[in-house]
Amino acid sequence: MSTGAIPFKAQMTAGAPGRESSHAFLGHAKRIGLLTLASRVLGMARESVAAGVFGSGVVWSAFTVAFTVPNLFRKLLGEGALSAAFIPLYAQAMDADPAEANRFAAASVNLLAVILAALTIAGELILGALLLLHPRADQALTIKLTAVMLPYVVLVCGAAFLGGVLQVHRRFNLPAASPSILNVVHIVVIMAGAWMIGLRGSHGQIEMQKQTVLVYWLAGFVLLAGGLQIVMLLPSLKAVGFRFDPRAAIWTPAVRKMVKLSIPVALSAGVLQLSVLIDKGITVFLSQGMDASGHLISRFTLFGHNIAYPMQIGAVARLNWAQFLYQFPLGIFAIAIATAIFPRLAADAMENGREKFRAALHSGIFATLLEGLPASLGLILVRYPAIRLLWEHGNFTPNDTMWVARSVVLYSAAIWAYSLQQILNRAYYAMHDTVTPLIWSIVTIVVNTVVEIPLVFTSLGEAGMAAGTLVSFAIQAVVMLILLDRTVGGLDLRRIGIGTMKMLAGCGAMAGACWLVEKTPLFPAGRGMIASAVQLVILMAVGAGAYLGTCSALGLNVREHLLHAGHGKMTR
């Protein structure tokens, strides 16, 4: 189950960011989208390099889980609760008294530093205690790598929070570009390190020892990348008047207000990040592992019963690669639409009659489905050439491709639901309703866990984890849409339903066209990188053409709907 950062209810005032024109906000969203695209492309390159050097074995699986921990805190604090509460308050303060706003920002940064330092120290103590329990070798490696990278929490959360300061001053480029530094560092360290220590992409105990050395190097350089992310923001922070002040009082009235406002979002974000930890934990503890001698551990004992582990070695890494694929269109399209439309929703939510709010929401839902449904099917159709092109080389085997492809099918089928959820969450927050998203976040965790645990013991194996995501997200999206329709007095779901049927017809045409082109003699065969790249381009072009052509023939103007979504207008 994968999650995204949760936005806070915007407090829109004259001069605050939410009162920008639609054109200006869409311009920001486009730039953010392009920089996010660049970062995700680099992320794909990073994972491709890692797949070739490490494969899906225990070493890279351990790093994947360990690196999840600081990223969870980044989403919870750096980009989540405190940051989301800080931005509207800081924007208002800048409009009223810039000097006081800068004091508030300095105090907030000091508070964040204290919280993160305390969490890091507590985390290191907990990790040390876990090692005393003598876990199996692969789990011990995960714990040790987590301990090395845990201080990254302070750096990455600090960079995200300082990026929020720059966003208030309409400086979006550097905060959006800074994550790319980590990807570049990863790529350089993996490639240079593999060459220096002589990793050849073979198997065996000696090769695993070399991989372990390299992954410790990589963990150490993660801290360097975190420091560089902060350093690159410093000139812009100085230019907008922000100054670090370690002596600034922390518990000021403004900071107390920020903390109070952040609590509802912290609860929702905490629940969602907990779901990520639960999924990782289930995968780690129900996957085959290695003992200290490098021997396979394939069974465990529970209440006197000897049970086979339902997931093979490398399940964590393979699921992580599958998530990379399905999150790619989410970050570029779904989040961009939700980001662009959120200020309009927040500005119109409290107006009498809410006509503009309903119109903007209707338009956003329609545009999200217009992109989300073909993205769901499209990724399923191109999964094999995409996986082979990105990862099937070196230590990444055809067996890995098969397992990743299974998970991609189920994760991809949830893209439309996750995309829709981004719009719905923002609609509830715009109405100052933080309870409904929180409740449904909890329900989603329960449904996800109840569905996935039995399924991993079936022939689905690790793909059962993706099935839990699909079922839980689909239920959450549909139910929250129905509840929102009742809350706001109608979203014209009948018209959305008719439009959705046309979109599904377009998806059917996409599937048929791709099937036909694969059967033609001119469609390239093979599974090499060049063949996979050509296959991918052909399928994407044919599929997109079939979908857009069918939608146009049925009266759906895709460009018009996406444009009106950004302006919050309803189209027919």
Image (spheres, grey):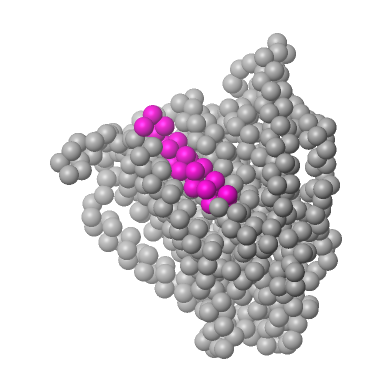
Q: As rendered, which of 444 and 104 lies closer to the eye?
A: 444
Q: Report x, y in % for residue 196.
A: 49, 40
Q: Report x, y in % for residue 386.
A: 61, 31
Residue located 49% across and 47% down the image: 472
Q: Is residue 121 left or right of residue 188?
A: left
Magenta span includes 147: no
Magenta span includes 465: yes
Please report the bounds of the magenta region as a residue range. Answer: 458-478
Figure quadrant of residue 373 = top right
Residue located 23% across and 55% down the image: 133
Q: Is residue 545 left or right of residue 10?
A: right
Res 180 seen here: no
Q: Report x, y in % for residue 398.
A: 49, 25
Residue located 44% across and 53% down the image: 445
- Eyeballing the image, is 500 above or below 406? below
Residue located 49% across and 43% down the image: 471
Q: Report x, y in % for residue 256.
A: 54, 84
